[in-house]
Image (tube, rainbow, N blue to C red):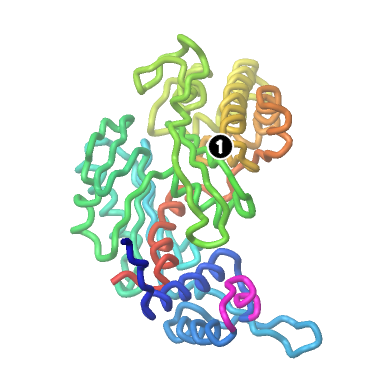
């Protein structure tokens, strides 16, 4: 006979803290009455938990709003200065490290070009970046460090084929050199989480966040009623085949989507040799010259067509209500090709699915991947309602 798990008073307290803190963090300021209605908790329980969160420095009062016929209700919000978090973006051309406040507002950024994808060299850049952005920060106020990598993560082991990494123990390599809890996860997944919390995915029930850079990935993210609902899972979208016997992909296959919409493929289509040191400036040049140069216009048009086909495949397979195009390639090319991408997606998507899906550009800015990684320690805070031990 299986005995039911007994919930202790401590478990119940942690659950209630998590529920109320998550609600304030993900939906913004609210009153005690708002929290009571949303959580189903009693007025006394909400008052007690909020008092604890205020005493712990996590929550503060934030003005008041008029109520219907009664006295004004006091609003509550998460304190941005409660703690700080670090997010690390390990890309193929650079390592970017950001320091953010507790509500994910950027404090400072540091970017280091990658000269070698050797794991020890990359780990050294991560450590240097964390040291730089946290200089002068009280270690007691540092909630944690999140690291986003372009590959699968199994515990501390990273599998990133485009880096040539197989089972690299990145977490174990970095952890001894930092003074806060360290979390490592796939960068598309964490970016998906950030877009749902703070970006173009906000308010969607089911969104696909596409990360376009040198490599191509995607994450499927669901709604944000609580930290538990703000989940995302990754897919190898960039290695779905869109052309039988097509261009050679870095993965060894042919005809992969990445071989047509990855940064390297786009620049080579335009006739510019790919080089990690000035990739973004060459992409910006492509956009600028598309107004007057036929070759540039043709390169963008083909990119938009293949990207639209890739988006259509996502919509046909996953039925999202929103697709968000993120990553630095989307930021550079997106404004000029978005109408063509939408048109191509419309032509290749089943009509009833296309009408329920919106296609937008990401809204988180150039530090979006680092910001996404910074959600990892915040997730832990929301899950427990307290700092990690």
Decide if residue 321 is on the left or right side of residue 95. right
12 vs 135, nearest the viewer: 12
308 vs 232, nearest the viewer: 232
In the displayed structure, 268 sits above or below 182; it is: above
Q: Is residue 194 magenta?
A: no
Point 49% across, 11% down: residue: 244
Q: Is residue 195 visible?
A: yes
x%, y% of residue 364? 55, 51
- The quarter of the picture where the C terminus appears is bottom left
Q: Main secondary structure of the magenta part?
A: helix
x%, y% of residue 234? 44, 40
Point 61% across, 42% down: residue: 361
Q: Is residue 116 visible?
A: no
78 vs 94, nearest the viewer: 78
In the displayed structure, 212 sits above or below 85; it is: above
The local crowd at label 1, few if under 14, some if 14 to 19, many if 20 or more residues have their Cα within 10 Å, is many
x%, y% of residue 220? 51, 42
Residue that badge 1 annotates: 330
Seen as rendered, the residue at the extreme front is 1
Residue 352 found in image quarter = top right
x%, y% of residue 309? 60, 24
Residue 277 found in image quarter = top left
Decide if residue 150 is on the left or right side of residue 280. left
Write the start and end of the magenta stretch as one range: 33-42
């Amino acid at each position: 006979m299986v005995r039911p798990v007994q919930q202790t008073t401590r478990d119940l307290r942690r659950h209630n803290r998590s529920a109320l803190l998550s609600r304030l963090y993900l939906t913004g300021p609210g009153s005690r009455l708002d929290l009571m209605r949303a959580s189903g908790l009693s007025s006394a329980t909400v008052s007690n938990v909020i008092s604890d969160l205020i005493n712990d420095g996590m929550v503060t009062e934030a003005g008041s709003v008029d109520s219907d016929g009664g006295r004004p209700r006091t609003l509550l919000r998460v304190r941005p200065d409660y703690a700080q978090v670090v997010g690390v973006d390990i890309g193929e051309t650079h390592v970017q490290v950001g320091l953010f406040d507790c509500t994910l507002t950027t404090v400072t950024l540091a970017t280091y070009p990658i000269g070698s994808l050797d794991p020890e060299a990359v780990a050294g850049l991560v450590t240097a970046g964390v040291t730089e952005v946290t200089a002068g920060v009280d270690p007691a106020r540092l909630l944690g460090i999140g690291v986003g990598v372009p590959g699968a993560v199994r515990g501390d082991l990273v599998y990133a084929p485009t880096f040539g990494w197989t089972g690299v123990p990145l977490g174990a390599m970095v952890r001894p050199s930092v003074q806060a809890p360290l979390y490592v996860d796939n960068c598309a997944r964490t970016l998906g989480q950030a877009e749902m919390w703070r970006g173009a995915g906000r308010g969607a029930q089911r969104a696909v966040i596409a990360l376009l850079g040198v490599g191509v990935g995607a994450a499927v993210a669901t709604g944000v009623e609580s930290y538990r609902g703000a989940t995302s899972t990754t897919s190898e979208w960039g290695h779905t085949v869109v052309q039988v016997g097509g261009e050679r992909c870095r993965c060894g296959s042919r005809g992969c989507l990445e071989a047509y919409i990855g940064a390297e493929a786009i620049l080579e289509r335009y006739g510019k040799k790919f080089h990690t040191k000035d990739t973004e400036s060459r992409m910006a040049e492509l956009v600028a010259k598309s107004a007057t140069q036929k070759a540039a216009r043709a390169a963008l048009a083909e990119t938009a067509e293949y990207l639209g086909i890739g988006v259509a495949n996502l919509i046909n397979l996953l039925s999202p209500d929103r697709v968000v195009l993120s990553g630095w390639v989307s930021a550079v090319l997106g404004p000029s090709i978005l109408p063509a991408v939408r048109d191509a997606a419309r032509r290749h998507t089943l009509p009833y699915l296309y009408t329920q899906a919106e296609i937008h550009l990401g809204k988180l800015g150039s530090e979006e991947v680092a910001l996404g990684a910074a959600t990892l320690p915040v997730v832990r805070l929301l899950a427990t309602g307290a700092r990690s031990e």
